[in-house]
Amino acid sequence: MVIIYCCYGGSHSSPVAAAIHIGQLARSKIPTKAELLSVPYYDQGDSLERGIVKPMGVDEYGNQVYICGRGSERRAIEQAVLSGIRLAGGNVEQVLFVNTLTAVNFWMRIGGFLSRKLKLVSLGRPLVVIGTLRAFPQLVKIVEQTKSSLTNG
């Protein structure tokens, strides 16, 4: 299976969810700021990278885990990704898009906008870190629901 965690920019909630999924971040405790900042792609990238599927790793069942920023074009980005998979001879039935935007809070939105859009990293990053730490339990729930659907589906 190919699991693609998706959020608006692909810089905050989706990399953290993917890191939880592959075991890079423990589900049982809120990570430290240093652990959060060590997650690949966390608070990196810009709007030009939306729609690019980035690898995060493989889970304990051999599922490939990726992230993708979709901006406001959720359906168009998903269709483009699935078209690319079809063109490459892949099986689109083996692709699962997981929306992580439901966990995004005010601090993540403001911090992400300042850090990624306005390039004011010194102002935005502390806010997005605070927001991500607060959203962590919701991200864990999203990952647990995703893993449950894989084993029960």
Image (spheres, rainbow, N blue to C red):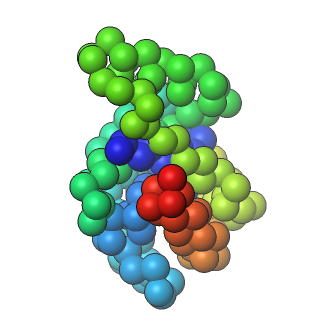
The image shows residue 8, relative to residue 137, as above or below, that is above
The image shows residue 22, relative to residue 70, as above or below, that is below
Please name the residue shown 48% across and 42% down the image.
96
Residue 39 seen from this side: yes
In the rendered image, residue 85, in percent from the top left (x then y), is placed at: 35, 22
Residue 115 seen from this side: no
- 135 relative to 32 in the view: left or right: right
The image shows residue 77, relative to residue 58, as above or below, that is above
Please name the residue shown 36% across and 42% down the image.
2
- 131 relative to 67 in the view: left or right: right
The image shows residue 93, relative to residue 29, as above or below, that is above
In the rendered image, residue 73, in percent from the top left (x then y), is placed at: 64, 25
Please name the residue shown 40% across and 37% down the image.
94
In the rendered image, residue 22, in percent from the top left (x then y), is placed at: 33, 64
- Residue positioned most to the right: 106
- Residue positioned most to the bottom: 29
Which of the 4 image quadrants contains residue 52? top left
- Out of 65 and 119, give the one closest to the viewer: 65
- Out of 11 and 93, give the one closest to the viewer: 93
- Residue positioned most to the top: 87
Please name the residue shown 51% across and 60% down the image.
152
In the rendered image, residue 24, in percent from the top left (x then y), is placed at: 31, 70
| Viewport quadrant of the N terminus | top left
